[in-house]
Image (tube, grey):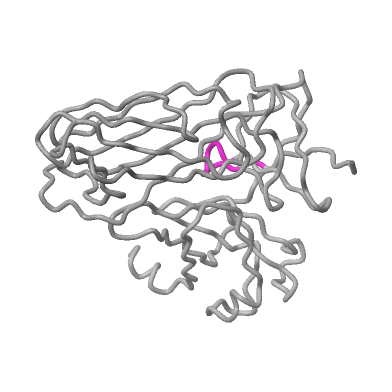
Amino acid sequence: EKQRSLASMQAIKISVKEEGWYRVSQPELIAAGLHPSTNPRRLQLFVDGKEQPISVTGEKDGKFDPQDAIEFYGAGLDTPSTDTRVYWLVAESRRGKRTQVYKGRGGQLADESFPYTAEKKDRTIYFAALKNGEEDNFFGPVITAAEEVNQLLNLRHLDPSPPSDALLEVALQGATNVPHRVKVLLNEAEVGEVVFDGQSLGTTGFTIPQALLLEGDNLVTLIAEGGEMDVSVVDYIRLTYWHTYTAEDDALKFTAQGGKQISLNGFSNSNIRVMDITDPNALLKVAGTVKSQ
């Protein structure tokens, strides 16, 4: 009975590769197969079998007009087989789940920045001989005694007076069954070593003064120091630093503590919306005040 119901249901497939706030207009949905007479109040969005809250502009009149649209929070996948997550938009017989509005009550002023992580995670080499169970066998560049590896991390809106230090994390996969010793430099300054054995995963975190970081590209250099047989590959490099509450290209993903008051800046126009995505299955639109600066 469930299969017959789904077979008769009109569904639009929406493929998402990157995390973000998505807007799909009525003309785009009609071109994809949605019936023009669909009642927008009945639109529902599903992913992995769970209904997702959405915003539907212009749904109050019960008509899905050309100027109307749906909006939702979407995120892609990071698996060896695909980077695409599929969302399904259907028109059901009941009202769909909608994004709720939360009106903030203010509170104490928060810090002027928050921890933000930049990651370098290349997947250019397949390590077929590695036996690591269900884990990924794709990695980044090879580190040897003969050739150092340079990786760039792009950082923006650094807090000049951060509340604490930054954190550099380096994860390397051993390719040979020997002890590994890899020196790590950040912007040509030595910060420490990643030391591990054989075909294991070596992960080390380094506390970094934020003053060592640069606005824009930051260079991480990896140098094998365990001899000719010291060969490893890069799993990932992460740098967590203090990022001001400043938008990048009119968008910003940030964290904030409940009960605090923050000020976001750097937007080019007043059409600003803040969505709490802590629980993607229960999104909240956070009301705030927009002022010119």
- On screen, residue 286 versus residue 167, left or right, reads right
- On screen, residue 254 versus residue 86, left or right, reads right
Q: Residue at x 13, y 53 (%)?
A: 128
Q: Which residues are magenta?
A: 277-284
User: For residue 67, which quarter of the picture?
Assistant: bottom right
Q: Find out whether residue 10 is within the magenta segment.
A: no
Q: Is residue 119 above or below residue 191?
A: below
- Please identify the quadrant where the C terminus is shown: top right
Q: Find out whether residue 280 is within the magenta segment.
A: yes
- On screen, residue 23 versus residue 182, left or right, reads right
User: For residue 204, which quarter of the picture?
Assistant: top left
Q: x and y percent of residue 121 in the render?
A: 38, 47
- Depth order, front residue of 131/198: 198
Q: Is residue 135 above or below residue 32?
A: above
Q: x and y percent of residue 143 in the render?
A: 26, 43
Q: x and y percent of residue 191 in the render?
A: 42, 25
Q: Residue at x 77, y 40 (%)?
A: 265
Q: x and y percent of residue 29 in the render?
A: 59, 74
Q: Residue at x 10, y 49 (%)?
A: 129
- Please identify the quadrant where the N terminus is shown: bottom left
User: For residue 155, which quarter of the picture?
Assistant: top right
Q: Residue furthest front?
A: 146
Q: Is residue 281 above or below residue 34?
A: above
